[in-house]
Image (cartoon, coloured by chain):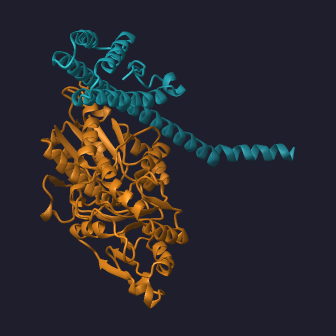
């Protein structure tokens, strides 16, 4: 009987100070959670902005490389057969714009392989554009990789923290 | 191209990062680019060409040494103005994690941003505590450069992810052509030590401990010591004969440094740690001075021993003494090292390093992309998102 009374008193005590403390603790936890969720959403916005920028940079570099290849093909250093093949590969790469579809990646890989086959003496202008394509693709894929790490988190997927931005994918071709 | 460079340390205090930034700015201008440097400055009356001051600095302990940083409201306001008025095609930030104008600039901007990590000692505690704040800046970096494999390893461990390794640049021209083509083999070895010897990590104590053993084998040996600071505490306890073999040069000008490197038989770099990149080794290579260095990773990366120079176990004075004696007695090897040096140094010349940095700038720039003020997502109006693109 006395034990029951003790428990009742303890319950009453819990009803005052401790309950307040528990309430404050829960509130603090909720605030921290809210802050973390908003931080993650803002972070994803920054990461998406960067992805758009690195993709635009990659687009610019592949166009410059294809244009340099066209210039080289018309430059007179190549025999007509090699020149025609290089022109064909470069034009196909230039025709592919926009999304990085498998077709576009294939066109870029084929241009890389064609350049390796037909260019036998080092050409500084071509080397410079090729180096920039490789760097731009690398930086773009690094940015994508970091975004994917965040977007694959369960909370991010469950709460749609990434909004309507489609899931990014790495751009893979032979450069 | 319009390039903005951000340097976190006081521009009027000599240092490796400051020197790199100013020389990069000079090289870029020589290639026809427009360059503006943002840096803290304590004396705003004597700013180098094209430098915008972010205000005065405070000396604070950061990353194991005392650094002069700018981080107050004035620095913050001036950084924002520099970004807004600059109209840059690309901004290149040095030491982006340092709590100075580098971090302020990262916060203030969006667009094509390149960052170079110089240090191999990023404090993980500071990173953990400031994590979310740093992350906001780091997420805007499109391309990361590390000055050495060592620095790249640190960046990868602390921040995750790879970086492109591009070493610090060097003007090799002032160092070349000063040295006698034939190495000396009479007299004794002239050994040279250069640097701020008051910092224990520069390793002068290791060299001085080795010196009596060198003298015992080569009585005509001479040790040249050049660098700023109080030398007496280091020389206490040496015998009069040992002291007589040491020549003190004090703090030397750039011109004197070139002359000392051109004249020495062996350049000693007994540094015990804290080096992410051996800029002084590249200078010695350019001058054709045979090098004996401690086997720090950063030094081995530059020297690729034994091809570009010799190394000895870090801190081992006996091994250093033996290495000096042995190298002096092998004129053919010294001749080989002296001949190989300038070729190896050319990898670090601005002509080479600058082109590689320029390639990184190009590879982060979309057509028409430029650096603009960063507008936080909460303050953006719908449909008018600032993407750093136009």
Whether residue B386 is visible here, answered yes or no, is no
Task: Tell me the quarter of the image containing the C terminus of chain B.
Answer: top left
Residue toward you, B95 or A174: A174
Residue plotted at (43% across, 29% down): A147
Please provide percent x and percent y for residue B256: 23, 71
Whether residue B157 is visible here, answered yes or no, is yes
Q: Residue furthest bottom?
A: B240
- Answer with the quarter of the image where residue B226 lies: bottom left
**In this view, B60 is above or below A78:** below
Residue plotted at (33% across, 21% down): A116
Q: Colour of chain A?
A: cyan
Residue plotted at (69% across, 47% down): A13
- Answer with the quarter of the image where residue B201 lies: bottom left
Please provide percent x and percent y for residue B120: 43, 53
Q: Residue furthest right?
A: A1
Chain identifier for the orange-coloured part of the image: B
């Amino acid at each position: 009987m006395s034990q029951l009374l003790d428990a009742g008193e303890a319950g009453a005590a819990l009803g005052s100070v401790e309950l307040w403390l528990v309430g404050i603790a829960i509130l603090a936890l909720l605030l921290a959670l809210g802050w973390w969720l908003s931080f993650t959403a803002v972070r994803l916005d920054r990461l998406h902005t960067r992805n758009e920028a690195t993709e635009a940079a990659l687009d610019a570099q592949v166009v410059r490389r294809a244009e340099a290849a066209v210039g080289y093909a018309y430059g007179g250093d190549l025999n007509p057969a090699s020149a025609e093949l290089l022109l064909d590969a470069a034009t196909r790469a230039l025709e592919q714009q926009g999304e990085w579809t498998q077709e576009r990646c294939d066109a870029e890989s084929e241009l890389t392989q064609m350049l390796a086959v037909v260019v036998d003496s080092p050409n500084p202008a071509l080397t410079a554009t090729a180096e920039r394509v490789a760097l731009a693709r690398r930086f773009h894929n690094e940015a994508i990789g970091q975004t994917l790490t965040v977007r694959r988190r369960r909370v991010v997927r469950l709460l749609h923290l990434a909004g309507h931005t489609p899931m990014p994918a790495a751009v893979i071709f032979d450069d | 191209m319009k390039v903005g460079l951000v340097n976190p340390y006081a521009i009027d205090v000599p240092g490796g990062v400051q020197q790199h930034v100013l020389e990069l700015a000079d090289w870029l201008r020589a290639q026809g680019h427009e360059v503006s440097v943002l840096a803290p400055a304590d004396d705003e009356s004597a700013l180098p060409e094209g430098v915008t001051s972010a205000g005065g600095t405070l000396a604070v302990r950061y990353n194991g040494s005392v650094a002069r940083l700018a981080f107050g409201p004035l620095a913050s306001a001036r950084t924002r103005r520099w970004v807004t008025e600059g109209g840059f095609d690309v901004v290149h930030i040095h030491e982006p994690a340092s709590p100075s104008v580098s971090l302020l600039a990262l916060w203030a901007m969006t667009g094509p941003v390149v960052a170079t990590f110089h240090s191999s000692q990023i404090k993980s505690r500071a990173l953990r505590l400031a994590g979310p704040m740093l992350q906001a800046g780091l997420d805007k970096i499109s391309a990361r450069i590390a000055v050495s494999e060592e620095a790249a390893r640190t960046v990868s461990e602390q921040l995750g992810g790879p970086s492109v390794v591009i070493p610090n640049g060097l003007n090799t021209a002032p160092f070349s052509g000063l040295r006698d083509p034939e190495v000396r083999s009479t007299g004794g070895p002239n050994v040279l030590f250069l640097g701020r010897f008051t910092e224990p990590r520069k390793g002068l104590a290791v060299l001085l401990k080795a010196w009596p053993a060198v003298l015992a084998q080569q009585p005509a040996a001479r040790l040249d010591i050049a660098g700023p600071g109080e030398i007496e505490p280091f020389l206490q306890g040496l015998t009069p004969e040992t002291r007589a073999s040491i020549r003190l040069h004090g703090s030397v000008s750039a011109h004197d440094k070139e002359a000392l490197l051109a004249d020495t038989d062996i350049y000693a770099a007994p540094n015990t740690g804290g080096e992410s990149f051996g800029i002084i080794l590249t200078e010695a290579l350019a001058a054709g001075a045979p090098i004996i260095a401690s086997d720090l990773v950063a030094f081995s990366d530059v020297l690729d021993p034994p091809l570009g120079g010799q190394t000895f176990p870090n801190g081992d004075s006996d091994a250093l003494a033996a290495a000096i004696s042995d190298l002096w007695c092998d004129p053919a090897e010294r001749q080989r090292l002296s001949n190989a040096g300038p070729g190896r140094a050319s990898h670090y010349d601005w002509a080479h390093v600058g082109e590689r940095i320029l390639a990184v700038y190009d590879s982060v720039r979309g057509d028409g992309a430029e650096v603009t003020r960063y507008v936080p997502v909460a303050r953006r109006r719908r449909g008018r998102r600032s993407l750093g693109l136009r």
